[in-house]
């Protein structure tokens, strides 16, 4: 397995962890549990951001610019 595939796998796992922590935060029944999940979510989002930045710097997570007209169309759709 090459580095790109390894990092893609780690990023996908991290995204899944963030999803679990988010739901744990939302569904928490006590302040302590909420705070614990919230802190874990914040830390996991930081790891996810770091992985994305590393992959993006290596050209492994390409992004593309969206046409301004498409952005305007979406804005208008949700403003109505």
Image (spheres, grey):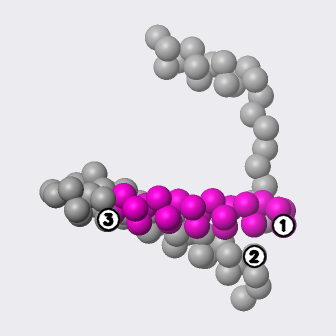
User: Regarding mark 1 in the picture, which secondary structure is present there?
Assistant: loop
Q: Is residue 47 magenta?
A: yes
Q: From which residue to which does the magenta span run? A: 37-59
Position in image of residue 59 (x %, y %): 84, 62
Where 71 falls versus 59 (above or below)? above
Mark 2 or mark 3: which is in front?
3
Direction from residue 16 to residue 55 in the image, left or right: right
Where 59 falls versus 73 (above or below)? below
| Identity of the residue drawn at 84% across and 66% down | 58
| Identity of the residue drawn at 36% across and 58% down | 38
Residue position marked by numbered label 2 in the rendering: 4
User: Regarding mark 3 in the picture, which secondary structure is present there?
Assistant: helix
Of callouts 2 and 1, the N-terminal one: 2
- Disc 1/disc 3 C-alpha distance (Å): 33 Å
- Disc 2/disc 3 C-alpha distance (Å): 32 Å
Where 70 falls versus 22 (above or below)? above
* Quadrant in which the N terminus appears: bottom right
Position in image of residue 69 (x %, y %): 73, 20
Residue position marked by numbered label 3 in the rendering: 36
Task: Mark 2: give few (<14), some (14-19) or many (20+) Cα within 10 Å.
Answer: some
Given residues 43 and 8, the one toward you in this image is: 43
Residue position marked by numbered label 1 in the rendering: 58
Task: Mark 1: give few (<14), some (14-19) or many (20+) Cα within 10 Å.
Answer: few
């Amino acid at each position: 397995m090459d580095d790109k595939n390894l990092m893609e796998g780690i990023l996908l796992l991290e995204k899944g962890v963030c999803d679990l922590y988010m739901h744990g935060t939302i569904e928490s029944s006590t302040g302590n549990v909420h705070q614990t999940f919230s802190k874990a979510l914040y830390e996991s989002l930081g790891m996810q951001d770091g992985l994305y930045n590393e992959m993006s710097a290596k050209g492994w997570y390409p992004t593309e610019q969206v046409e301004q007209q498409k952005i305007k169309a979406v804005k208008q759709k949700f403003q109505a």
